[in-house]
Structure formats: structure tokens, C-alpha cells
């Protein structure tokens, strides 16, 4: 071994060798496995994210509701197969119609009705100004009171004269008074009796005068002559009204016009050449021009026994079997005079707009709306006329059907109403 140089101190190793326990603690234990983390929350989060993402994608890519226009299927009825002998045109007329006026001339104070109002018989329609009439009535009543007072006075005088005549006759029987006094007593009694009779007549005249003025006051109250509906209002408060025409003046001749709606019937002019096809009691089918799909039963009331030589027609009156609220005076209509043979059973059909019927798979279909979605329905077309189609089967009355919409409608597609 080498020797240290002279004069150099020897090195001393101060580091100690590690012990075995220290070295054992520094070793990595490979036998212990790390704790595994749970996968449930992680999977649930992933699934939730996928669902949300899918919902967002569906929301932005979802099919939009189809914009369509719809209509309601309606039912029509046929009265059956009665044979029609004659067709004609006519009008609705009222057998009971009146323009209500007053009995006296006066200024309208108020009008209590309007067009379309129903009135009952005796109902007050308007009032006239009765200021002058009431003044005359009060004067007549005062004159009646004066006549009655004079009558009472004369009656008292007559009673006294009658008693005086009786006494005079007693005295004349005993010759205590002269014949002249007896004649004077008789004359006074007869004169008072005559005056009493005249005053009784004056009282009667005064009573009649009071009755006349009371009637004129009552005549200023205009009442409905019968129950009906007001169809025209002819006067306003402040206007003058008179029962007679005032020429070119501003005086009205009526307050209103009332129609008894229960007296409506049909008036038809039938050509002379075909009047032999009409008879009293014959069944008639009436169709109002305003409601061409509805037929109303009626029958012939009478054939007016005269002809219009200028038009070569005969007037026929037709009465309704049952009045309908849709029937109004002066409405135009068509009538079909039927034969008296037994009619065939009535039939029913459904009418829809022609645009609602489509062709698919060699069949006629319509799209029926149910809860905001469309349902395909096969139908049987009976006939088409104008803008309407009559269906024999497939659709019920009152169902909502699509009339306009996209051509690619599918079963169950959502729709929204497209306002015109």
C-alpha cells in the first residue's frame, strides 16, 4: 500500500456504511396492487352526454309541422225518390204583415223598438206627445164637474118645488089658496123638472166629451196589433206622424213594420201551360236560394182562381210543413211539385271540398285531422259538382279534413293550420 507523503496528514473516511434496515426501506414493494377507481359515474356521465347531444341534434333536425288548410265534412240528406212533376221559382211571403201607425197626428215622443225585435200583441211600440190633448181632457173634466154641480142644484130646487106643490094642492082643496097659486106651483115644478132633464143630458154630453179626450190620449200610445218581428223602423223621436199621407211634407205615416213569422208561406207563379200538374194538397219540396243543400217539406195550400194575362201565369200558394228559423220574408227559392206516389227511402251523403280528395295507390283518399296529426282514409266518391264532392263512405259528418297541403304528407305527420 502506498504511504502518505511526508508531512501530509492521512485522510479519514467519515461516511458510514448504510445499514440493512435502511436499504430494505428503500425497496419498492411490487406485491401491493393499486386500488381500482369505480367506472359507474364515468359511464353514466358519458351516457347522459350522448343523450343530451342526441336530443339537441334531434331538436334542430326534427321534421317541422306541415302547413295545411282544413274544412269540416258536412252531411246532406235527400228526401227520397218522389217523382218531380214541375219545377218553379218563387218567394217567401207573409200573410200577416202590417205597417203600424197612429190614429191621430202628433209628434213622436219616443220609439221603444228596433229592427229584429220580437213584440207581443198589445206591446207598446211608441208614444206621441199628448200635452195639448191632456189640457183639453182636463178642460172637459172640469166642464163635467160643473154640469154635475148644476144638476145637483136643480135637483134640490125640484125637490123643494115638489113639496111646495103638494102643500098648495092641500090648501087649494080647502079653498085657502087660489087656483092661480096652484097653477104657479105646478109651473115651477114642471120647469125645474125640464131643467133637470136638460142638465142630465148636459152631464151625459160632458161625460162623452171626457171619454173622447181620454181615447185620444190613449191613441197617442201606439201598440202592436199582433205578435211578430219588427222588420223596419220608420220614425224617430221628434218627427211628426199622421195616419194620412202628408204629400211632400216631412210627416211620417208609420212607426214600424211588423211581420207575423208564423204566417210565412211561398208564392209561386206557374205557367198556364203547366198548371194542370198542380193540385191542392200536393207535396212540394222547397229549396231556399241561400241554403241550396237543405230541402224543406211543404204542400200546396191553394191555387188562386185567376190568371195574369200579361205574364200568362197562375199564382199558387204553398205552405211549409214546419217553419224554419232560416226562412225570412221575400227570400228567393226553388220549388219542386212532387207526385203523390210513395217516396223512396231517404238517403244521406257527406259533402267535402273537391280539393280534399286525392289519388294514391289507385284509390281515392282524404287526410283526416286527429289531435294535430293526419290520418289517411280511403273514401268512396259518389259524385262531383262544382267545387264540392259527395262521398258515399269513408268520412263522417263533422270530421276535419285537409283541403290544401304538401303532396308528401305521411301517416301521423304533424300539421299546423295555415290561415288564408
Image (cartoon, rainbow, N blue to C red):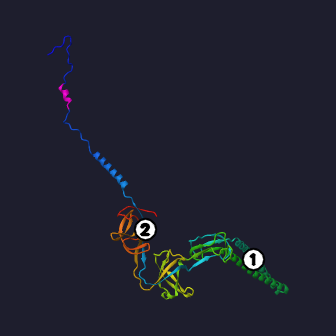
Dot 2 alpha-carbon crowd within 10 angstroms: few under 14, some 14 to 19, many 20 or more: some
Residue 121 horizontal/vertical position (percent): 58, 75
Q: Nearer the viewer, residue 235 or 403?
A: 403
Q: Residue 226 — which label?
A: none
Q: Indicate the quadrant where residue 161 lies.
A: bottom right
- In space, the residues marked 2 and 1 are separated at their CA atoms by 82 Å
Q: Which mark is residue 147?
A: 1
| Nearest to viewer (mark 2 / mark 1) | 2
Residue 106: x %, y % from top left: 68, 73
Secondary element type, mark 1: helix
Secondary element at tag 2:
strand
Give the residue pinned by disc 2: 71
Could you tell me which residue is drawn at 31 percent across and 50 percent down?
A: 50
Within the magenta stretch, is there residue 412? no
Work out whether residue 203 or residue 222 is closer to the camera in this orientation and state it.
Answer: 222
- Quarter of the picture holding the N terminus: top left
What is the quadrant of residue 182 in the picture? bottom right
Q: Residue at x 59, y 75 (%)?
A: 257
Q: Residues within 10 Å of mark 1 (few under 14, many from 20)?
A: many
Mark 2 and mark 1 lie on one chain; the one further toward the N terminus is 2
Majority SS type along the magenta span: helix
Q: Is residue 208 visible?
A: yes
Residue range in magenta is 19-27
Q: Which one is nearer the viewer's eye here, 215 or 326?
A: 326
Residue 73 in view (yes/no): no
Amino acid at each position: 500500500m502506498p504511504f502518505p507523503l511526508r508531512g501530509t496528514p492521512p485522510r479519514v473516511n467519515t461516511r458510514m456504511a448504510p445499514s440493512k434496515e435502511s436499504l430494505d426501506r428503500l425497496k419498492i414493494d411490487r406485491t401491493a396492487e393499486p386500488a381500482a377507481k369505480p367506472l359507474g359515474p364515468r359511464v353514466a356521465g358519458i351516457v347522459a352526454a350522448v343523450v343530451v347531444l342526441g336530443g339537441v341534434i334531434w331538436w334542430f333536425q326534427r321534421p317541422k309541422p306541415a302547413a295545411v288548410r282544413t274544412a269540416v265534412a258536412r252531411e246532406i240528406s235527400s228526401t227520397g225518390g218522389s217523382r218531380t212533376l214541375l219545377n218553379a221559382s218563387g218567394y217567401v211571403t207573409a200573410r200577416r204583415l202590417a205597417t203600424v201607425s197612429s190614429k191621430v197626428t202628433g209628434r213622436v215622443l219616443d220609439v221603444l223598438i228596433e229592427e229584429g225585435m220580437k213584440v207581443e200583441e198589445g206591446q207598446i211600440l211608441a208614444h206621441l206627445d199628448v200635452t195639448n190633448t191632456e189640457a183639453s181632457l182636463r178642460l172637459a173634466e172640469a166642464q163635467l164637474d160643473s154640469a154635475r154641480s148644476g144638476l145637483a142644484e136643480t135637483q134640490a130646487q125640484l125637490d123643494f118645488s115638489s113639496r111646495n106643490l103638494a102643500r098648495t094642492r092641500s090648501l087649494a082643496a080647502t079653498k085657502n089658496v087660489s087656483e092661480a097659486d096652484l097653477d104657479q106651483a105646478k109651473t115651477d115644478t114642471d120647469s125645474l123638472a125640464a131643467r133637470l132633464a136638460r142638465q142630465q143630458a148636459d152631464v151625459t154630453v160632458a161625460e162623452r166629451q171626457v171619454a173622447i179626450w181620454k181615447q185620444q190620449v190613449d191613441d197617442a200610445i201606439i201598440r202592436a196589433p199582433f205578435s211578430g218581428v219588427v222588420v223596419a223602423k220608420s220614425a224617430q223621436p221628434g218627427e211628426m206622424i199622421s195616419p194620412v199621407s202628408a204629400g211632400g211634407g216631412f210627416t211620417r205615416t208609420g212607426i214600424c213594420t211588423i211581420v207575423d213569422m208564423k204566417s210565412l208561406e211561398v208564392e209561386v207563379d206557374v205557367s198556364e201551360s203547366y198548371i194542370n200538374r198542380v193540385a191542392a194538397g200536393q207535396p212540394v219540396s222547397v229549396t231556399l236560394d241561400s241554403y241550396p243543400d237543405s230541402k224543406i217539406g211543404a204542400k200546396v195550400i191553394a191555387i188562386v182562381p185567376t190568371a195574369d194575362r200579361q205574364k200568362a201565369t197562375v199564382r199558387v200558394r204553398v205552405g211549409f210543413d214546419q217553419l224554419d228559423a232560416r226562412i225570412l220574408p221575400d227570400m228567393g227559392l226553388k220549388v219542386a211539385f212532387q207526385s203523390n206516389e210513395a217516396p223512396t227511402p231517404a238517403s244521406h251523403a257527406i259533402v267535402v271540398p273537391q280539393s280534399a280528395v286525392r289519388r294514391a295507390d289507385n284509390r281515392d283518399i282524404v287526410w283526416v285531422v286527429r289531435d294535430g296529426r293526419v290520418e289517411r282514409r280511403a273514401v268512396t266518391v259518389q259524385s262531383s259538382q262544382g267545387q264540392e264532392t259527395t262521398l258515399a263512405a269513408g268520412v263522417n259528418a263533422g270530421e276535419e279534413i285537409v283541403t290544401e297541403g304538401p303532396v308528401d304528407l305521411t301517416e301521423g305527420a304533424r300539421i299546423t293550420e295555415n290561415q288564408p
